[in-house]
Image: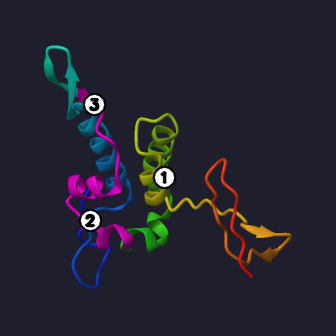
Amino acid sequence: MVDNESNPVGRPRKYEPDGLAEIFEVYQVWRLEHPLKKPMPTKNGVVDVSIERPMSLREFCVQADISRETWSNYCQLPEFLEVTSRIRNIVEGEQIVNGLVGNYNGNLVARLSSIKDNQDHTSGGDPITGTVVFVPQGEKPIIED
């Protein structure tokens, strides 16, 4: 897992690609074995319910004992590209699926995954100009020139 010879300049890398993949598998098992507790109200009071711990790259970095900067550096190295892409796809895929089914906050998942909702708010390609006024039902709008 640890490689002290592949990085002749500076500090040795903590992991090589295979080692990073192995520690990710360890992380996946760990998070399933360590669920979160969520207080849920019942008619008899509040009960802590176990819920699956969400995957996150930040938590993976903590488990792997690497900084976010080290993770970013690994993502830039050609020999790590396949494993870091796979890890990112697994984490983001799980977040997106759980966001879609309502297990996670969909807005937060979209922000974490850099998903944007681009909607064209124009009129035939031209920007909408003027003032939009909402008039309560049953009342007449007052138009001033």
Please state which amino acid type lies under the numbered disc 3: Ile
Q: Which mark is residue 51?
A: 3
Q: Give the residue furthest to the right.
A: 124
Q: Position of residue 82 (x, y in %)?
A: 50, 58
In the figure, is residue 117 to the left or right of 109? right
Circles 2, 3 touching at the beta carbon (< 8 Å): no
How many C-alpha atoms fall within 10 Å of the one at disc 1: few (<14), some, or many (≥20)? few
* Residue 120 locus on image (x, y percent): 73, 66
Residue located at (33% from left, 55% from top) = 20
In the image, the segment drawn in magenta is 50-72
The residue under label 1 is 86
* Residue situated in front as seen by the camera: 41 or 128: 128
Q: Nearer the viewer, residue 3 or 78?
A: 78
Figure quadrant of residue 43: top left
Most distant residue in the bottom direction: 9
The total of numbered circles placed on residues is 3
Q: Earlier in the sequence, mark 2 or mark 3?
A: 2
Element at label 1: helix
* Mark 1 or 3: the one toward you: 3
